[in-house]
C-alpha cells in the first residue's frame, strides 16, 4: 500500500479477512484500500469495526477520522456537520493515545486548511499543526508544510520546503516525487530538466512504483519527446503492469495541448483496458478524456 499497490493489497487483505473476519488490523487496512478506490461507505464500515475491536489503537482512530472527513466533504451541509463532529472526536481520541501520530495530525491539518471557518477551518492552525509534524517527523512535516503552500504562488518557499524534505531523507520516494511534480506541474516557471532528474532519482529508489513514470510521461508528452515517451510508457507497463496511470497522464497532457490526438486516444483506451489502481484517475475520469478527444477532433474537423 505504501508503494501504491492497492489492488495487490486488496487481494491479500480480503484473503486474511476471509479466514479471520475480526482481525482489527486487516479491517483497518481494508478501510484504507476501500477509501483509495472511492468506496467511502465501505471504508467507513471497516474503520468503525476496527476501532470497535481495538479502541486503544491511535492509527485506527486516525483512519476513521480521515474517512469521516472525506465523507463530510461529499455530504450535504447538515449531514456534513455531523460527520465533522465525529471526525473531531476521532482526532481527539487518536491524539490522546499518541500525540505525535503523523497520519492523524495530517487529517487535522488538511481539515483546518480546507474547511470553512464556520465548520472549524483555521489556516493558522493548519500551519501550526504542520509545525508539530516537522518537529515529530520532519520528512513528512516538510511535505505537509509544502502542501499548505501549494496554491499560494510562493514558488521559492515551496521549492525550499520540498528540497528540505528530500535532504532530510534522500531515500524518501514521496519527497522525490513531490519535488519532481513541483518542477513539472506546479511551478509557474516549469523546469523540465529538474523534474526529469528528480523523477529518475525516484525511479532508482523503487522501479516498481508508478509515480516516477507518471511524471516522466507528463514531461515527455509536454516536450513532444516521442521516443522517450514511448520508452517510459513501455518501461512503466513492464515494471508496474497493474497501474497504467502514466498512460492517462500522457494522454491528458496531449489533450490539453491539442497535440497528437490519435496517440492520446490510444493511451486512454490502454488505461481503460483494466481496473484503475487505487488513488489514480477513475474510469469515469478516463472516459471524460475520451470525450474530450472526440470534441477536440470534431472542432478541428469543422
Image (cartoon, grey):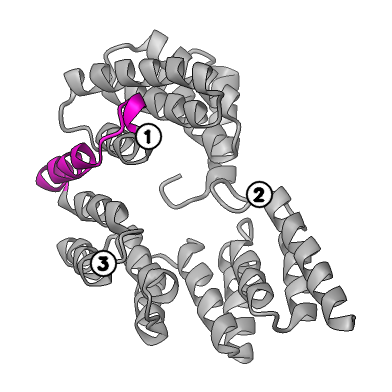
Q: Is residue 97 visible?
A: yes
Q: Which percent across, then down, holds residue 228?
A: 57, 87
Determine the residue positioned at 27% across, 38% down.
109
What x and y, as percent, mark residue 156? 22, 72
Q: From what the image shows, is residue 57 above or below residue 63?
A: above
Work out how far the residue at label 3 is from the one at label 1, CA to CA, in angstroms: 22 Å
Foreground: disc 2 or disc 3: 3
Residue assigned mark 3: 154
- Give the Cα separation between the discs numbered 2 and 3: 31 Å
Hey, which quadrant is residue 262 in on the image?
A: bottom right
Task: Look at 40% across and 30% down and name the residue there.
Answer: 66
Task: Find residue 282 and name its label.
Answer: 2
Badge 2 or badge 1: first in the primary sequence: 1
Among all residues in the image, which is located at the extreme top?
Answer: 52
Question: If you read the primary sequence from the N terminus, does the residue marked by circle 3 or circle 1 appear first?
Answer: 1
Helix, strand or loop at label 3? It is loop
Q: Which residues are magenta?
A: 117-137
Numbered badge on residue 115: 1
**Distance in Å between CA atoms under marks 2 and 1:** 25 Å
Residue 119 among those drawn in magenta: yes
Amino acid at each position: 500500500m505504501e508503494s501504491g499497490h492497492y489492488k495487490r493489497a486488496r487481494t491479500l487483505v480480503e484473503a486474511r479477512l476471509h479466514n479471520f473476519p475480526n482481525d482489527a488490523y486487516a479491517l483497518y487496512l481494508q478501510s484504507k484500500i476501500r477509501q483509495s478506490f472511492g468506496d467511502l461507505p465501505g471504508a467507513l464500515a471497516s474503520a468503525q469495526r476496527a476501532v470497535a475491536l481495538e479502541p486503544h489503537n491511535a492509527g485506527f482512530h486516525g483512519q476513521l477520522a480521515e474517512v469521516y472527513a472525506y465523507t463530510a466533504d461529499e455530504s450535504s451541509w447538515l449531514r456534513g456537520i455531523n460527520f465533522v463532529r465525529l471526525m473531531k472526536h476521532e482526532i481527539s481520541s487518536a491524539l490522546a493515545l499518541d500525540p505525535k501520530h503523523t497520519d492523524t495530525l495530517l487529517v487535522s491539518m488538511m481539515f483546518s486548511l480546507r474547511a470553512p471557518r464556520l465548520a472549524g477551518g483555521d489556516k493558522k492552525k493548519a500551519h501550526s499543526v504542520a509545525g508539530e509534524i516537522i518537529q515529530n517527523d520532519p520528512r513528512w512535516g516538510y511535505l505537509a508544510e509544502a502542501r499548505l503552500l501549494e496554491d499560494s504562488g510562493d514558488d521559492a518557499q515551496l521549492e525550499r520546503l520540498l528540497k528540505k524534505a528530500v535532504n532530510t531523507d534522500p531515500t524518501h520516494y514521496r519527497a522525490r516525487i513531490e519535488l519532481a511534480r513541483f518542477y513539472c506541474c506546479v511551478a509557474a516557471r516549469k523546469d523540465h530538466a529538474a523534474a526529469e532528474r528528480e523523477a529518475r532519482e525516484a525511479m532508482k529508489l523503487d522501479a516498481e512504483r508508478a509515480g516516477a513514470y507518471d511524471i516522466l510521461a507528463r514531461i515527455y508528452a509536454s516536450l513532444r519527446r516521442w521516443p522517450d515517451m514511448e520508452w517510459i510508457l513501455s518501461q512503466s507497463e513492464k515494471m508496474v503492469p497493474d497501474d497504467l496511470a502514466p498512460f492517462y497522464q500522457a494522454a491528458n497532457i496531449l489533450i490539453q495541448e491539442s497535440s497528437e490526438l490519435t496517440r492520446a486516444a490510444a493511451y486512454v483506451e490502454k488505461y481503460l483496458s483494466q481496473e484503475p489502481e487505487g488513488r489514480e484517475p477513475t474510469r469515469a475520469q478516463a472516459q471524460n478524456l475520451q470525450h474530450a478527444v472526440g470534441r477536440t477532433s470534431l472542432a478541428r474537423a469543422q
